[in-house]
Amino acid sequence: MSYCLNPACSQPQNPPPNRFCQTCGAKLRLRDRYRALKPLGEGGFGRTFLAVDEDKPSQPHCVIKQFFPQAQGTENIRKATELFDREAVRLEELGKHPQIPELMAYFTEDRRQYLVQEFIDGRNLEQVLDEEGIFTESDIRQLLDDLLPVLQFIHDRRVIHRDVKPENIIRKFSKTGGRSGNLVLVDFGAAKFSNPTSKTVTGTVIGSAGYAAPEQALGKASFASDIYSLGVTCICLLTGVEPFNLYSVADGDWIWRDFLTVSVSDELGKILDKMLATATKLRYSSAADILRDLHPPASPQPPPSVPKQYRTEAVSKKRDRVWNCALTLRGHTGSVLSVSLSGNGRILASGSADGTIKLWQLPEGLLLRTIVSSSSVGAVDLTRDGQLLVNGNYFNAVEFWPVNEGLADRIFEGLKTLFLGNPNSGSRRRTLREHKNSVQSIAIHPQGQIVASGSDDKTVKLWRLDTGQEMFSLRGHSGLLAGVKAVAFSPDGDILASASDDTTICLWEVRTGKQLRVLQGHTKSVRAIAFSPDGTMLASGSTDTTVRLWDTRTGAELQTFNGHQKRVNAVAFSPDGRYLASGSRDGTPILWRLSNGTAIDRLGGHTGAVNALTFDRAGTMLVGACDRTVVVWQ
């Protein structure tokens, strides 16, 4: 389809090959290059069209913006023309930033002005809200992390956007159909004139009603005005309510908390309140200030807080090993979410979002068996002898599988009743469905008698491995966002740790199910935990991109490791206790030296997010779940 850009054309749709409109005769290609395909929208002084650049071999999509003022009166037309010119100048200055559309052309044709800019393939946040529902605190924090650097970039160049709102923020699609993670700020026209169907402030005041700061309505916009508009955007996305209904004229204050259906921490609430302050002297003056409050620097820790045995390693002069990718195992069709090794390191289990568990023989990398679960497999663990596999899945289930034929005759007498079917087909299993939501984590007790499962229903359950009987249901994580993302037993089996979306880690006494203490310090969901070989320390990885080290005896935070760019999904100690490995959605596993907290290696040989990591007991092999593959480093 070709679309005629003549505003007076009564039938603008045309067949694709046409060079001239079959209705009005107007040229269908601007500069004999850009062909409009369909209209995208219409504002106060411009119309936008999806277009194609036919001058390039790939014929990429682009956006044509046509100057088409709706304002009445000579002064308003003059102002609209000036703002359209300014938009082109701003885009030329700012469009090199990856989160601002690039200006491709600016010209006049047939006595009409046009600018052509980069097409951003995605949905604006108003569409995302309509299609996916209200945003969570994690979503808002990600939004601020993505967009505040863009505001700082334009403010550093003395530009005020003046129309920040959900419609002008686009979340890009990735090439594979997922989300890219980056938000793009669009529409630097920054002027909307009133018309009967718009929400724009009356007159020539710049900005959108409800989102514009009070000083902006008086024609005195500042950099803080963009911050105010971004704050309004955040509370609208958190509540799904229009800004006019979130402000109480009687109280002279925002009442957005009255409309919340998701929990918001006091920390984020205070940040949003300061962004929304009516008085500019009480509001944030820069985007950088907000980012500092979102990610406060960790308090420096004195060296004595690190256990003695790790401090003395610093002077041991041992050389760090070099790790290389030795093996890449392929076969899963969905992301690999969990991996586990048998005690001798010969059997490897991998669980995937494709609903399967694969058993591999190492070091050869031979596929021994594929087990089909009832749903996506979020967690797997093998008993130390490699005879029994336990997994959790997204269908609220904990499943037990014998690895070898004849297992039911060799393990605990009570377990024989758990399995049915043919062991060679991988169908002999016992399924426990006491959880009320997906099971995200599984851990088998070091002595093999107990299984722990953590679920998005906010509970941790302890089961007897021999009978499948539930021992305890542990409830220590609370709030709307409190799903349990990781569980781990201490090496002696006396303590169980659980990590949650509520940003905390709970330590439990296994014998009684009593809660011992709560570890607090992360600012976002805790996705991974691991005990040190001697049990005195616990490592944790979080959506806040940090890895933290804790003293399990006192609950004190020992150290914070900063090096990842995205959420940390995996942590694992080396068996000798000298190193900590961490994996993230940024796709780069990092190996840390515990004696001084330095990153000594960034492991390659893979692509995609790292969802799980585990060392073998000898410390000669590190296994990672890397997107749809399993990678073995040696």
Image (spheres, rainbow, N blue to C red):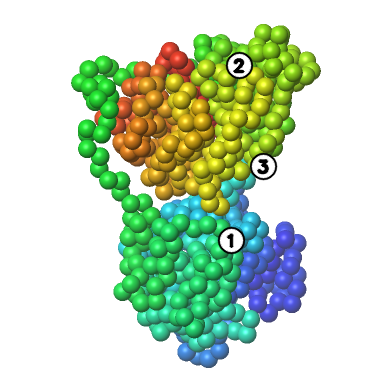
What residue would you read off at disc 3? Answer: 436
- Residue 351 vs 10, above or below: the answer is above
Q: Is residue 400 left or right of residue 551?
A: right
* x and y, in percent, of residue 348 in the image: 57, 18
Q: Is residue 575 left or right of residue 193?
A: left
Residue sitting at the far left: 315
Of all residues shown, which one is farthest toward the front?
512
Q: Residue 360: which disc?
A: 2
Q: Within 10 angstroms of label 1, few (less than 14), some, or many (20 or more) residues?
A: few
Between disc 2 and disc 3, whose residue precedes?
A: 2
Q: Kindly identify the residue that appears in the image at 65 percent across and 42 percent down.
A: 437
The x, y position of residue 149, in whole percent, is 39, 56
Name the residue at 75% across, 62% down: 15
N-term-proximal mark, 1 vs 3:
1
Where residue 18 appears, as percent x and y from the top left, is 72, 62
At which x and y percent is residue 420? Answer: 78, 19
Closer to the N terminus: mark 2 or mark 1? Answer: 1
* Marks 2/3: CA–CA distance: 31 Å
Mark count: 3
Q: Does residue 453 appear to the left or right of 82 in the view shown?
A: right
- Quadrant for the C terminus in the image: top left
Amino acid type assigned to the residue bearing label 3 in the image: Lys
Badge 2 crowding class, 10 Å Cα cut-off, few under 14, some 14 to 19, many 20 or more, is many
Label 2: which secondary element: strand
Q: Secondary structure at mark 1?
A: loop
Q: Which residue is mark 1?
A: 261
Residue 405: numbered disc: none
Which quadrant would residue 305 be assigned to in this image? top left
* Callout in the foreground (2, 1): 1
